[in-house]
Image: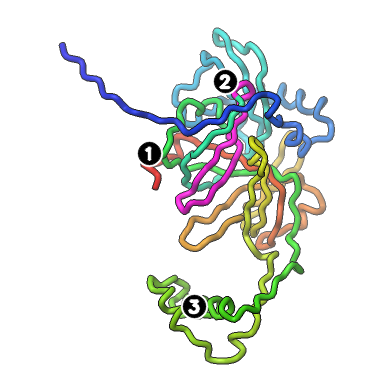
Amino acid sequence: MTINYQYKNIQSPTKITLTDEQSAGHADHWSILTDDMSHDVPEWLQKMIEKAAMPKGLNSNVSAQDSCLLLSEDQPCHINQVLAMKDGKPECFINAYPCIDSPYGLNCKIERIIANDNSHDAVLRLRTADGSIIYAFDQLYTPNRHLYQRDISYFVNLSAWAHEIKLSDQHEVIMVEDQEAIRYHRAFNDIVAANDGKIPDDLQEQIKEWKPETKEQMAPVEINLGHMCAYLFGDTLGQEDEAWCQGQVLGKQETEFNGQSIILFDVVILREQDADPFVIRIGALNMPETATINVQDYVQANVWLQAAIYKENQQKPSKAN
């Protein structure tokens, strides 16, 4: 009998391992939701066990026999809890953190993983198809940690908890007076408008040929920075998922987290030409200052950005560009 083996060279993303001392933990994240962590968090963890589910992520074979188990809840805002297992029974508590589900996401490849394997905390460095870099905390590191592959494009769902979210400063403007910059701005708008809102293939050539028809077309241009979309990730190793962003609210709804009213804002924070928009679902406590934010408003926020990668959301794996 002849046995044929097929060798597959599967490479994992680059990984940086953090010690417990280097890891920040989740105290700041729980403090978004409660001023009494020592009382509320243990109560929430006990309560969630009664209706806990086992999210599979990319792993179809999640089992209570695994060495570590991730428990979650089927709620828009929920808790993920990591337990060490032995002989199919919980041996000890490892970690827990609040999460938000999001229908929005982007196709990305995982360039790097920054992880503490004791706590199962991990931050993914993601590169989108258009080259943008995103850092996000991995909600599903426990079931997915051995399955990620380098150079594979995954659809990544993206969400966030807001440390702070407020209306953008509408008075923050800059005045563009450089004549060449003004000419480019006016030419671009005129050409795209004449092309039914689409960017022609010879855009740069048309811009070079464009000439103003009136003096008013070359007047200084005022740009409202409060109407910009922007995303800045953190600059501390292992905490790059703590981000600042600004964008436009596309949707707003209310939900609950352990009896507390939560507002979910769908916000586009990057909106570039020829690229998929970067939209995240941001959760914030329902308070007077958050309740006044409406759809179409521009907001700025300090957020804890999260990622979730599920097998059922993936197309057939393909090599990323």
According to the picture, the residue beneath numbered tag 3 turns out to be 193
For image coordinates 62% across by 78% down, the residue present is 178
The residue under label 2 is: 69
SS at mark 2 in the image: strand
Q: Which percent across, then down, holds residue 84?
A: 61, 15
Q: Is residue 37 visible?
A: yes
Q: Give the residue drawn at x 60%, y 91%.
A: 215
121 in magenta? yes
- Kindly report the distance in space between the C-alpha atoms of the residues bearing marks 1 and 3: 38 Å
- Residue 142, numbered label: none
Residues at marks 3 and 2, CA–CA distance in whole angstroms: 54 Å
The N terminus lies in quadrant: top left
| Residue that carries the numbered disc 1 in the rendered image | 317
Which residues lie in the magenta part?
Answer: 117-139
Q: Earlier in the sequence, mark 1 or mark 2?
A: 2
Task: Identify the image quadrant of residue 23.
Answer: top right
| Vertical order, 303 against 177 (above or below) | above
